[in-house]
Image (tube, rainbow, N blue to C red):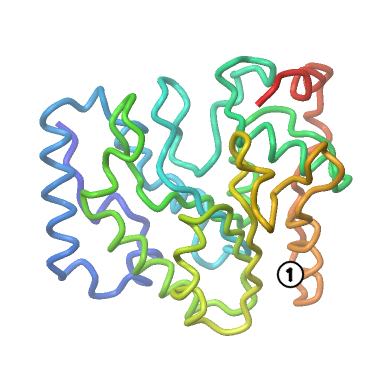
Amino acid sequence: MYQFSKDDIPQDWRGLLGDFFETAQWHQLQQNLRAELDLDTECICPEPDHFFKALQLTPLNSVQAVILGQDPYHSPGLAQGLAFSIPKDIPTNSRVFPSSLRNISKALALEGFGALPNGDLQDWAKQGVLLLNTALSVKLGEAGSHTGLGWQFFIDRLITELAKAKPHLVWMLWGGHAQSKLPLIELGTNQLILQSSHPSGLGVYKTSRPFLQAGGAASCGHFTQANKWLRQHRNTEIQWVNTSLTTSHQIGLFNIRD
């Protein structure tokens, strides 16, 4: 039986969170998650040992950028513990390929980086892009079903301490939920905060700061702006698209409506 505990979190991130593990909020989250796991582990996404995969793949000292998602994909076989990321073996022209990833790929192509070869963003994580959801678990088939378990206290503390500990980070806040964390990020110094609509579905176009311009005329420019900021602060740019992985099946990425 899987036992949810602070030991699942890498030591560097535990150090950043400090005394949070002594708080009532942490103990409540731990109690709530254990109760859900005892009911039916098979119905929880991602697999429990991937709850903290974003923190495992992106050590604290390597973080350069943060992309905030909401909660994991709740459809079977998609969630892997990284915001927006899915397993690489899901074809880009598949009906289950998320519209958010399809639009992220369109934005990258419009900015000159090329389209994503697949939906697996682990390479971003390994380059210092923290792909962080604001709830780290969800019940299969029920979007937002674990947002009330107490994840918000854990994530809010992590965002606050990260912003205060590391200047010159890039934050990509797509949609109202991610943008609600703005006051926490502003507690840090010299952070680049990029905001737009969420990249999923038709909402991608429908705000004063669209992720994509209607008709595919342009993107929000976030990936280009991030690399410019990193250059200015003498950090390594992110290779957003690994061109060695590009394959002809990318063509299908642009042939399915969102």
The residue singled out by tag 1 in the image is: 235
Residue 193 is drawn in which quadrant? bottom right
Relative vertical location of residue 140 with respect to residue 3 in this rendering, above or below: above
Q: Which residue type does callout 1 highlight?
A: Asn
Task: Name the one closer to the observer, 209 or 8.
Answer: 209
Position of the C terminus by quadrant: top right
Q: Residue at x 77, y 49 (%)?
A: 239
Q: Is residue 206 left or right of residue 152?
A: right
Say which of 41 and 97 sits in front: 97
- Give the class, few, some or many, for how many residues have Cα within 10 Å of label 1's Cα (few <14, many ≥20): few
71 left or right of 63? left
Q: Quadrant of the N terminus?
A: top left
Residue 215 position, x and y percent, is: 82, 36
**Which picture quadrant has residue 122?**
top right
Percent coordinates x, y for residue 86 in the rendering: 54, 30
- Residue 112 percent coordinates (x, y): 89, 45
- Position of 23 with respect to 130 (left or right) is left
Label 1 element class: loop
**Pick the front one: 23 or 152:** 152
Give the total number of marks visible in the rendering: 1
Question: Going 48% across and 79% down the picture, which residue do you hit?
Answer: 165
Q: In this rendering, is residue 109 above or below 177?
A: above
| Residue at 13% in and 56% down | 28
**Residue 71 image point, x, y percent:** 40, 43
